[in-house]
Image (cartoon, rainbow, N blue to C red):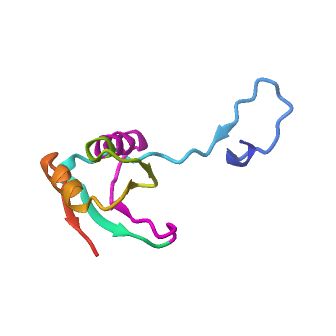
Amino acid sequence: MAKNRIDVVYSTNPDFQYRYDEPEEKETLSPSKQSLRVMLERKNRGGKSVTLITGFVGKHDDLADLAKELKSKCGVGGSAKDGEILIQGDFRDKILQLLLQKGYKAKKAN
């Protein structure tokens, strides 16, 4: 935690309040303003394929909610981090349709 402190490394004052450098989360754009790309990726996955959704702009909680909904609709596992959603298996067409129904601007990439 000490690495994120701003301006002061150490203080002997017991009432001193450190300021921390915390990355700001971007506000989540509305679905119609999102530009998502849905693609299939196989490299560095031990021969298994995953459907990758990139381009999400917004808070991590909103990304996690969208990932959870997509995973449950496809009936598979996956993860969400750094603006990307990974869905296990090849579900490009199904995910593209689900995103379009929810109002996202999405297209297939590859």
Left or right of residue 78, residue 31 in this image? left
On whether residue 45 falls in the magenta region, the answer is yes
Which residues lie in the magenta part? 44-70
Q: Residue at x 64, y 41 (%)?
A: 20
Asked if 1 appears above or below 46 in the picture, the reply is above
Asked if 25 appears above or below 105 in the picture, the reply is above
| Quadrant where the N terminus is found in the figure | top right
Asked if 106 appears above or below 63 in the picture, the reply is below
Left or right of residue 48, residue 39 in this image? left
Q: Residue furthest right?
A: 12
Asked if 77 appears above or below 51 in the picture, the reply is above
Residue 19 pos. (x, y %):
65, 38
Q: Residue furthest top?
A: 15
Q: Nearer the viewer, residue 75 or 19?
A: 75
Say which quarter of the image contains residue 18: top right
Left or right of residue 17, residue 10 in this image? right
Q: Residue at x 40, y 39 (%)?
A: 61
Residue 23 pos. (x, y %):
53, 48
Q: Nearer the viewer, residue 104 or 92?
A: 92
Residue 54 pos. (x, y %):
34, 61
Q: Residue at x 20, y 65 (%)?
A: 107
Total label count?
0
Q: Residue furthest bottom?
A: 110
| Quadrant where the C terminus is found in the figure | bottom left
Q: Nearer the viewer, residue 57 or 19?
A: 57
On whether residue 88 falls in the magenta region, the answer is no
Left or right of residue 80, residue 32 in this image? left
